[in-house]
Image (spheres, rainbow, N blue to C red):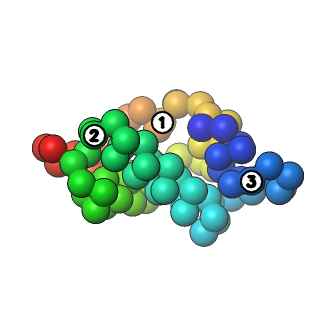
Amino acid sequence: MSLALVSGCTGQQAPDSYTDGVQKNFINGCTNTSVADGTLGSASEAKQYCTCAYNAIKKNVKFSTFAGGRRSRADSVSPCAASSP
C-alpha cells in the first residue's frame, strides 16, 4: 500500500499513525477492490471483512510497516474468515 493511498490525496501530509482517514481509505479501497473483483460477495460482506482486516492490521502491525507497504506481519494476520460468494 502506498503512502498516497494512506494519505488519501496528493499534496496532503502523509499520516504517521493510524487515523480515521487511514481507516476510511483502507476500508473503502479494500471494499471497492473486493466488489470489483467479486472476491468477497456483496458490498456489505466486503465492507464487513475489510473492517475486520483493518482492525487486525491496526492491532498487529506497526504503522510504519503498514505505511511502508512491507508485508512482514501483515501476511500472517488473518483473523477474518472471508464469506463464500
Residue 52 at least partly seen: no
Closer to us: mark 2 or mark 1? 2
Of the 4 image quadrants, the one containing the C terminus is top left
Within the image, what quadrant is residue 22 found in?
bottom right
Circles 2, 1 touching at the beta carbon (< 8 Å):
no
Amino acid at the residue labelled 3: Cys
Per the model, the C-alpha gap separating discs 1 and 3 is 26 Å
Q: Residue furthest left?
A: 84
Residue nearer the viewer, 19 or 48: 48
Secondary-structure class at tag 3: loop
Q: For mark 2, does the 10 Å Cα neighbourhood hold few (<14), some (14 to 19), or many (20 or more) residues? A: few
Q: Which of the marked residues, 1 or 3, is nearer the chain's N terminus?
A: 3
Per the model, the C-alpha gap separating discs 2 and 1 is 26 Å
The percent coordinates of residue 6 (x first, y second) are 65, 50
Q: Which of the marked residues, 2 or 3, is nearer the chain's N terminus?
A: 3
Residue 4 at least partly seen: yes
The percent coordinates of residue 59 (x first, y second) are 47, 56
Figure check: 69 above or below 21: above
Residue drawn at x 47%, y 56% as measured from the top left: 27
| Left-right relation of 61 to 64 | left
Q: For mark 1, does the 10 Å Cα neighbourhood hold few (<14), some (14 to 19), or many (20 or more) residues? A: few
Secondary-structure class at tag 2: loop
Closer to us: mark 1 or mark 3? 3
Residue 38's disc is 2
Per the model, the C-alpha gap separating discs 2 and 3 is 26 Å
Residue drawn at x 71%, y 44% as measured from the top left: 4
Residue 9's disc is 3
Residue under numbered circle 1: 73
Figure check: 48 above or below 5: below
The percent coordinates of residue 58 (x first, y second) are 51, 55
The percent coordinates of residue 3 (x first, y second) are 71, 43
Amino acid at the residue labelled 1: Arg
